[in-house]
Every structure is written in structure tokens, then in C-alpha cells.
Amino acid sequence: MWNTVNQQISQAIHYEFKHTQKRQLQSSSTDKLFHLSNGTHNYLVKIAKKHELERFEAQAQGLKQLTQNSVFMIPDCITTGANIEYAFIVLEWLTLDELPHTHWSTMGKHLAMLHQKHEQAMFGFDTDNYLSSTPQPNQWHKKWDVFFAEERIGWQLQLLAEKGIVLAEPNQLIDQVKEQLHNHPVLPSLLHGNFWRGNIGFVNTIPTLFDPACYYGDREVDIAMSELFAPLPDDFYSAYNQHYPLAQGYEQRKLVYQLYPILNNANIYAGHYLNQAKEHVDKLLND
């Protein structure tokens, strides 16, 4: 396995690389994480089962999109590959600043700058990708309410139904989502797509993003997700709104947008996340 990794890094950097240090890191996902070094070059290597190669390749594409369209410090993807048993992705090693941090206003400004680029006319992405470990369909749509209701909420409900879990009558919930978003004008922005505290940080005070689930959609999706699990400091939201104020009605739409990551957690982890999803669905349908 590691011979294959060393060989592909060597091919990518046009320099013979053979690691002399390999340190396993803590991971909140099913991927195994390693810090790989030869004393001069340092890399982050993620390892998963071979069938996960497509997910790593999608992650690499998302990182490339963010590099091309933002001023965030984005780790370069050095290479992706697989052997007979495992898939891997090799990323530039970034040493994150220790938190708490004082540059959250810069983070907010950088995200606003990314969202202010409206160069895509439709909603979706060139390829399907993944939210965490869940496949994420990105078929192009002209209408945002249709895209989010069907490609996001409808898809998650379908995955749950395949496991025998029904949180609500699917068409009723999908129609409710469309109704909530129908009169909300949206210009497509490139989204990080999984924007929460666990996927952001700072490198020498420069904001950085990683583990994207990119697509073109309503910028409020990123903001809503950032408020869900561990809200960011007020400086972040103040700076974002200063550079690109959120539209009226965001607080109502936030409940709709937060349903997607909540359903995704229910699909991946089940347990109490299913209860959280049921409560959120009931709130949306009864408000």
C-alpha cells in the first residue's frame, strides 16, 4: 500500500519520494488519516476502502474549484489512487493555527467574496459528489426550489426509505420545501457545501477550507450549515453581512437548509440523529 502511495507522490512531484515518518492522526470519519514525511516534504494521506476512490476524486475536484474561485488557502491535491484493497488521496500538509482565533472577520469576508461570484446560470455541478460519505446528486436545474427540494431533501428521504425509515410523507415534505423557497430569488454561488467548524481553520492567520461538497446553489446554505452544529463567532457573521448582506427571510429559510445536513447525519449515523431529523421535519410541516 505505502509503496504505491510513495510511487504516485514521486510521479506527481517529479521527485523521488520515500517516506521516513508515518504518523496516524485522529479522525472523525471512517477514513484513516496519516501524516507522511521524508523530512523535507510533508503530506496528509487519507485511506479508505478501494470503492471510495470516486469520493476522493470528487473531493480533489472540489478543492480545485475552491482554489480557482476563492482567496481561501486551499490544500493542493497531490494525487489520488488505489491498490488492490485501498483507495487514497494525498493532500498538501497544512499546519492549522491553534484556536481560539481572532481572524473570524477575515473568514467571513472571504466567504462573502466567494459567494459574490455569480458566473454560473444554473444550479448543480458538473459531476455528482459526496456530502461526507453520502453520494450527492448534482443534476443541473434552472429553478433553485426544484433543485433543493429534489436533489437534496428528496434524495435524502429516498436513502432513508431504502433503510425502511419514513419521517414524513415524502411528496408532502418536498412540496413544502418548494413552497418555502419558491418566491426566494437566488443567483447561483459556488458553495463549499459542507461548511461547518470541522472543515475550516486558519494557517498563519489565513482562512482555509477543506473537505468540500461543492455545487452551485443558494449562498445561504453555507451560512445555515455553519450555524447548525457549532455556530461560528459573531465576528464571522458580522463581516459576512457587511460584505454581502443576507436577504430578508433568511431565518425562515435557514430551517429548510439545515434539514439537509440533519437528514444526512440521520442516514449515516442513525441513533439520536433520527430523532433530531423527525423533530425538524415536524417543525417544518407544522409551522
Image (cartoon, rainbow, N blue to C red):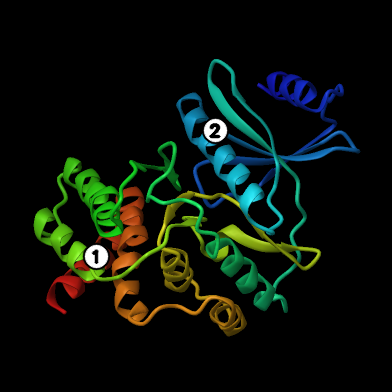
Question: In this picture, is 13 found above or below 102?
Answer: above
Count every numbered label the image shows and give the total.
2
Amino acid type, mark 1: Asn
Does residue 168 appear anywhere in the picture?
Answer: yes
> Residue 18: which quarter of the image?
top right
Q: What residue sits right under mark 1 in the picture?
A: 275
Which residue in the rendered view is the most extreme toward the top? 84
Nearer-the-camera pick, 211 or 74:
74
Which residue is depicted at the point 71% across and 76% down?
103
Which mark, by number, is residue 233?
Answer: none
In the rendering, at what x and y percent does residue 188 appear?
Answer: 43, 57
Q: What residue sits right under mark 2 in the picture?
A: 57
Nearer-the-camera pick, 226 or 123:
123
Secondary structure beneath dot 1 equals helix
Eye-nearest disc, 1 or 2:
2
Question: In this picture, is 93 found above or below 263?
Answer: above
Q: Earlier in the sequence, mark 1 or mark 2?
A: 2
